[in-house]
Image (cartoon, grey):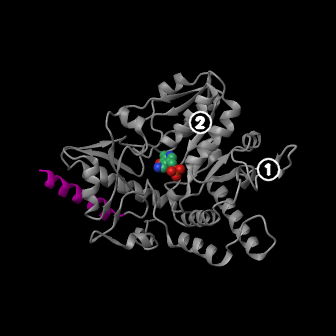
Amino acid sequence: MDFDVESVRAQFPALQQEVNGRPLIYLDSAATTQKPKAVIDAITHYYQCDNANVHRAAHALSSRATSAFEASRQLVADFLGSPDPAQVIWVRGVTEAVNLVAYSWGRSNLNAGDRVLVSTLEHHSDIVPWQLVCAERGAEVVAIPVSDEGVIDQAAYDELLDERVKMVAVNHVSNALGTVNPVKEMVAKAKAAGALCMVDGAQAVAHWPLDVIDLGCDFYAFSGHKLFGPTGVGALWGRRKLLEAMPPFFGGGEMIDRVSFDGTTFNTIPFKFEAGTPHIAGVIGLGAAVKWVQSLDRDAAAAHEAQLLAHCDELAQEIPGLRRLGPDTNRIGVFSFLLEGTHPEDLGTLLDQQGIAIRTGHHCAQPLMSRFDIPGSARASFSLYNTMADVEALFTGLRKVQELFA
Ligand code: PMP
């Protein structure tokens, strides 16, 4: 079945605008995706009709807000393939999810001499929290090297996996290069070595269906705003036994069973990890986003995205001095590159003048940039609402920039 990109695009109000007198070509979905009207309407509906705090009051609005809030948890649980919605914890996004696991699990499980393996492809949010907790516990963060193509070196990974390793943290897809990592195999190896494995799904969830049970991981995290949902909300999925054994991360209202000055007991999961008033509108918006994405033919959407990237790679070969980063295969959503004679920052500004939005810089992956000995790159990133015309506009734009510098 063909993917009807025009009818999908029509559902995204922000894509219908002009920027600098040109129709917007939005190629920054790896930073954040645009939002369909279904998501915007769900958030507006909550604030206009159901606005109340959740889980607390007996009145109608609170009951409606709570139902919508918990319905979103079930939607996300189904989306991830979780057997139980209680294993889905609301967080602000991947950053908070990694901090939660690093501190809650790490403080009680990491000891002097232990190791946390992270790949060189990781976003800073999957490096720094581990560094902080390891420094506190006398443990060590060790990087798994990547090849010149930007692929995790599996032989080096095998070698690093010894009894000192307690956790492997790896992203499903690299935000800087688009590399799709063989996480299922990596999880299996980690488990065989007696380590846990946390997968950062920030760049994966918008591209294909997921099944955390099939992946075999212990924790999986994603951010709503990269899945057509609102900013400030995301989900951490974890194995029940681990979550139940972990101490709370934040203390406050909602996460308790009983509070007294003689000692406090805690709520069951997921509430043990959800102190304070949550981002209710965000959670409801995220539920709407999941529902929206599930309503699509996801195989057709993935095939459409693969065509966009293939067209991009094809056109790139016609641009002299363009160096593409990342692997030729097993890559999704991202076209990361350098253009000879142009600084990525200038490139970003000059493309913006033509209405084309890309991202430039280190993409919060400085260790990876150091690996390639570059300060940063230009990155065009695609989502299911992009068209072949968007890809062509990017290359027309690049040619114009080259003419300016000729
Ligand atoms: N991991 C990856 C791979 C990412 O792309 C991002 C966001 N750029 C994050 C983690 C952090 O996500 P957030 O800022 O939503 O917490």
Q: Nearer the viewer, mark 2 or mark 1?
A: 1
Q: Position of residue 102 (x, y in %)?
A: 62, 38
Position of residue 11 relative to residue 406, above or below, is below
Q: Residue at x 42, y 70 (%)?
A: 14
How packed is label 2: few (under 14 Cα within 10 Å), some, or many (20 or more)? many
Q: Which residue of the protein is positioned furthest toward the right in this rendering?
A: 262
**Residue 202 visible in the current orientation:** no
Give whichever of discs 2 and 1 has the lower sequence position: 2
Asked if residue 23 lies left or right of residue 43, the reply is left
Tell me if I can see residue 225 in this picture. yes
Q: How many marks?
A: 2
Type of amino acid at the residue the image marks with label 2:
Val
Comparing 135 with 97, the one in front is: 135
Work out whether 330 lies above or below 357. above
Give the farthest residue toward the front: 261
Q: Which mark is residue 268?
A: 1
Residue depicted at 29% across the width and 50% down the height: 345
Q: Secondary structure at mark 1?
A: loop
Residue positioned 56% across, 58% down in the render? 232
- Circle 2 residue: 187
Residue 268 belongs to the span the image colors magenta: no
* Amino acid at dot 1: Thr
Q: Which residues are magenta?
A: 387-406
Q: Are marks 2 and 1 in contact (CB under 8 Å)?
A: no
The image shows residue 201 at horizontal and vertical percentages of 54, 48
Left or right, 363 with respect to 88, comes to left
Which residue occupies the extreme left position in the image?
A: 406
Badge 1, how many Cα within 10 Å: few under 14, some, many 20+? some
> Could you tell me how far apart the alpha carbons at marks 2 and 1 are, in whole angstroms?
27 Å
Secondary structure mainly formed by the magenta segment: helix
Q: Indicate the quadrant where residue 185 lies.
A: top right
